[in-house]
Amino acid sequence: MRRIVAILLLIIVAVGISLSLAKIPFGVPKTKVGRHYINEGVEETGAVNIVTSVVVSYRGFDTLGEVTVLFIAAIGLGAVLTAGGKEKTGKTEPASLILSTGCRILFPLILVFGTYVFIHGHLTPGGGFQGGAIIASGFLLIYLGCRERRISQKASKLTESLGGLVFVIIGLLGLVSGGYFLLNFLPKGTANTLFSAGIIPIIYIAIGFKVGSELAGIIDNLIEES
Amino acid sequence: MVNPVLLIAVPLGLVFAIPLFALFWKDAAKYIPPAALGFNLVVSLLLLPKVLENPVIVSIGGWQPPFCINLVAGPVGVLFSAIIALVGLLVSIYALNYIKEGATEKYHMLYLLLLTGATGVVLTGDIFNLFVFFEILCISSYALVAYLREKSGIESAVKYLIQGAVGSSLLLIGIGLLYGQFGTLNMADIAEKITSVSPVSLFVPMVLLITGLGVEAAIFPLNAWLPDAHSSAPSSISAILSGIAIEVGLYAVARIIFTIFGASSIFLFLAFLGILTLLIGEMCAFSQNNIKRMLAYSSIGQIGLILFALAIATSYGVTGGLFQLVSHTLSKALLFLAAGYMIYQTGSMEISALEGMGKKMPLTCLAFTVGAFSLVGLPPFIGFPSKFLIVRAALATKETFLFAALGLALLGTVIEGAYFFRVVQVLYFKADMPNPGKKEAPVTALIPMFIFVVLIVVVGIYPKLVTDVLNSAAIELLNRLDYIRSVLG
Amino acid sequence: MSFLNNYIYYIGAFGLILIGLYIVLVKHNLIKVIVGLGVLDTGVNLFLISVGYITKGTAPIFSRSGIDPELMVDPVPQALVLTAIVIGVAVLALALSLAIRLYQHYGTLNLRKIREQRW
């Protein structure tokens, strides 16, 4: 009974959406806003990666909201899961020698790669979120490989807070110096070099650290609970 | 002149800084939300006189709209952020002594984030930014419903989360369809381009957007999560959810329909949905024994009434709807705050357990009674002028369907009166036990309740205090062309 | 055939969305419902990106001089999807933590049996 109702509902949704998709041809350039960003983006923001300039500069407020959402998830997880006095049931057996050594060798390499991705966010594909996710996967590898190591909860909380605070403070500095929140007030430099694009690399570094420590904290909470 | 961005940026910065403050001062987390919300209240009240004539448009990042995100601080936005700040401030003072167990630092951070998300939703002028702040609001509320970690809380939070997540995905599909057709995400820009497309192709995005936002706004049939969620959350959170979160959802629906789509053909259907929601909410509330569940169903009913008033779509109707919204926020928050301590004293949420509370907690029960009478619409409380305005608006349109709907709305009010009087009767007139000692709620709870009572009575006696602001707000909502002109120049 | 060629991304994205909706509506196990939410999120993100695609376009990065700006895909949907993916991850993480707690309280993950709040 429930299946039939669900399938009927889905057929209605599918028909409705295909009707309106007919108005959006695939592969045809449609937007003037997108064109403006591509044509003027490098001059106006100094970043050669146009997606980065859209994410951090033109639509930076959305990125601030996104960083906040991840923060909420980390706090919510902590609030729901921290039991208070529940010991771990059962001991996990230690990993084999090859696994733990391999993880220990790979971990710094992964960290360096993640850092590279978020520092060069304005020059190559990537950025703060991608780099942070890579760093968190390095931490996950350590949890799975060398099973007794944990990162300090306090350090990860402090990094999260500092990352978010740096983002908001840079926005407020833009407000103070130029009258617009998140104004790009540092010099833009020459395009395609590391020290260019004003505040964009700084914001992405803050986001990279924040996301990395946040996702690692989430993984830590979930592993502690089971 | 103060920049409206500070209404969002300052609380956000303070939330991020709470763990850093907590290193030096253990109790910092309790006092930062009242400080941040006090700041917001002051800024909103300073901005309010200036935006009544012309909305303040703030571009983020120094670019010009439509190539950037912009905030539109008009009468609606600043009025809503003032209300959010006021109610949030009072409830956070209440929570200073109410929230004692669990990870209290996290409660306060999530609380301030919820209110920041709500402020962002009412101030923004960009549809994807609306989605992002809406998600901030929703996800904090999922986490806060589950805060006490009891059986009922976790179960309600799971159901709320699943329905909310599906709603958000539908909202995102609608935004994608709009972007594909118009190539821009700015609300004023879309509103300008809407007239160039046939209305048929706009039907599907509009339905998706209303469904996605309607889950949070608790429109029937999308409100199955509400009774569980609002009754299992801690009482201060129930006050915020019933008083702010669903109203902000309804504001988002109104903004989409009035400003972006200007869809006059859907108003009749929305009025019908509003009356349906009202009747179902009031009838379910009548049969409840659990006081918080009864209040939650009453919220559903009131949202139906507000939706009906907004769907009348004349200046009277929208003013009446906004007035009813303010009245519901103040009254329902007061009811939940009072119920919170009554439940704490008796240890049970059943109405029959509240017998004789009138003698045991006289001030709290008086506050509850004021809230109840105000919600039903008795003078001299704020519920009376707001309901009167809605009646006058419906009668002024001369449409027979609206007359019939008005009759049903009045029937709903009668049912509402019935179940609230039943509770008041239990509180005061069933005292067959000997006089127990008075065990009143603590001062930090009494002060916010008292301020709510004062506001309800004062605005009820002099509604002129707020009707000018509400009138400007209604005109801003209804007047698309002025909105487009003020943003795009 | 060229219709299929043109619209295959839309069909794929909506297929995922419909599958995700079906799982959320019909399945009883909470973990399956959460997986369904994930599939739904993936479908929506895929749809958003394919709205911005330009035929024979390339990534909007001016890594060398002399790249033709006319052939770049629209950067705005990519920024939107970045945000949407992160929000989806946050919701899934919260859902999983609630599932863990729910299992501790009820001993089962069957949504039909977790119905203490009636009426």
Image: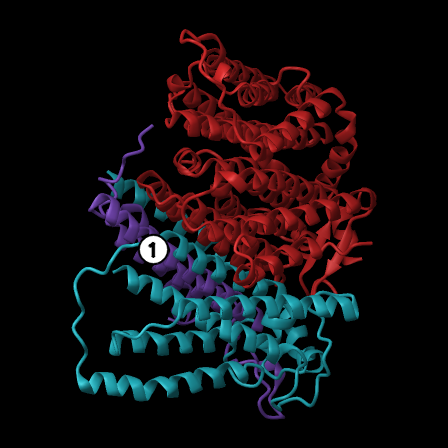
Chain colours: A cyan, B red, C purple
The residue closer to the viewer here, B264 or B484, is B484
Residue at horizontal 67 percent and vertical 19 percent from the top: B388
Relative placement, left or right, of B76 versus A221 is right
Residue at horizontal 69 percent and vertical 21 percent from the top: B385
Q: Which quarter of the rendering shows the N terminus of chain B?
A: bottom right
Please provide percent x and percent y for residue C8: 39, 68
* Outermost residue toward the front in this view: B437
The residue closer to the viewer here, B242 or C53, is B242
Can see residue B272?
Answer: no
Relative placement, left or right, of B316 versus B248 is right
Residue A145 against residue B171 in the figure, above or below: below
* Quadrant assignment, res B264: top right
* Quadrant assignment, res C75: bottom right
Residue B34 against residue A118 in the figure, above or below: above
Please provide percent x and percent y for residue A168: 63, 65
Please provide percent x and percent y for residue B307: 58, 32
Relative placement, left or right, of B361 versus A15 is right
User: Given the image, on which type of amino acid does mark 1 rest?
Assistant: Ser
The residue closer to the viewer here, C41 or B198, is C41
Please provide percent x and percent y for residue A103: 28, 84
* Quadrant assignment, res A18: bottom left
Residue named by callout 1: C97
**Tag 1 secondary structure:** helix
